[in-house]
């Protein structure tokens, strides 16, 4: 499809394991965001990629979290040594450009850490 | 510290009533957006406002950006059950800063 694609849609893991979440943004979108949403809460900003600029990592909650964006397209969010408090829905969004561009969201990856 | 404060957190009203939800901050934003999110889905953009004092209308929804570009409101006239959802405001302090979201107002419209 033409929208933002995220995988997996659901992931259940054990505490201490590493997980990778993938985002395939809309073709041609230069901006890519990762957010997470805990149950009943708003969206917590994690990291922002804009073109070839250095990513804004100011929202990453700890050094267990990292993300990369290869070739200006696909992005992977990695969480190492998962903890129960990492359980949330992780959303990826992309935008056509800087400034006031509309964000297009994927359907999210639901992570449950047992 | 939450950059954007939304109120109320929860709102349950009868079909046909009017309502207003608020988004406030001590920061100045170059632009502010409102999104609506339904269960199991990502948020979807409703409107973007960029000019202080700007008012935009989208059918029964009226959005206003404060004169100082620190706050915004969303007014819904004659609410319908289809308006049920989580309403999120989001702001950018400048073109190069990330879009940050408030915690949202969860609206339930009862038929």
Image (spheres, coloured by chain):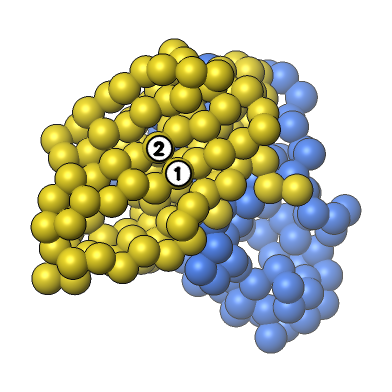
Left or right: residue B23 compared with residue A56 = left
Image coordinates of residue B74 in percent, x first then y, are 34, 40
Residue positioned most to the bottom: A114
Disc number at residue A103? none
Disc 2: CA contacts within 10 A as few (<14), some (14-19) or many (>=20): many
Which of the pair A78/B66 is nearer the observer?
A: B66
Q: Are marks 1 and 2 on the same chain?
A: yes
Instruction: Give yes or no for contact between labels 1 and 2 (Cβ–Cβ under 8 Å).
Output: yes
Q: Secondary structure at mark 1?
A: strand
Residue at 72% x, 19% y is A53
Precedes in sequence: disc 1 or disc 2: 1
Dot 1: chain letter: B
Image coordinates of residue A91 in percent, x first then y, are 53, 52
Which of the pair A70/B2 is nearer the observer?
A: B2
Residue at 57% x, 27% y is B70
What count of labels does the image hold?
2
Disc number at residue B73? 2
Dot 2: chain letter: B
Q: Which residue is denoted by mark 1 in the rendering? A: B22
Q: Is residue B45 above or below residue B41?
A: above
Q: Is residue B57 above or below residue A42?
A: above
Residue at 75% x, 48% y is B1
Disc 1: CA contacts within 10 A as few (<14), some (14-19) or many (>=20): many
Quick one: quadrant of the N terminus of chain A?
top left
- Real-space Cα separation, disc 1 to disc 2, in angstroms: 5 Å
Q: Colour of chain A?
A: blue
Q: Colour of chain B?
A: yellow
Residue at 75% x, 61% y is A79
């Amino acid at each position: 499809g033409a929208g933002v694609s995220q995988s997996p849609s659901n992931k259940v893991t054990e505490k201490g394991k590493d997980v990778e979440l993938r985002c395939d943004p809309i073709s041609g979108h230069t901006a890519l965001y990762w957010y997470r949403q805990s149950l009943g809460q708003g969206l917590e900003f994690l990291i922002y990629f804009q073109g070839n600029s250095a990513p804004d990592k100011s929202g990453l909650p700890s050094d267990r979290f990292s993300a990369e964006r290869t070739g200006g397209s696909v992005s992977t969010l990695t969480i190492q040594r998962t903890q129960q408090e990492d359980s949330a829905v992780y959303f990826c969004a992309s935008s056509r450009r800087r400034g006031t561009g509309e964000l297009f969201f994927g359907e999210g990856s639901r992570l449950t850490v047992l | 510290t939450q950059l954007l404060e939304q109120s109320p957190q929860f709102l349950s009203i009868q079909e046909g009533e009017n309502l207003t939800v608020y988004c406030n901050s001590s920061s100045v934003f170059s632009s502010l957006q409102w999104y609506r999110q339904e269960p199991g889905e990502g948020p979807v953009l409703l409107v973007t406002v960029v000019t202080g004092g700007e008012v935009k209308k989208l059918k029964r929804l009226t959005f206003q950006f404060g004169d100082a570009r620190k706050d915004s409101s969303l007014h819904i006239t004659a609410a319908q059950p289809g308006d049920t959802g989580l309403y999120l405001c989001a702001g950018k302090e400048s073109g190069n800063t990330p879009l940050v979201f408030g915690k949202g107002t969860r609206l339930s419209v009862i038929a």
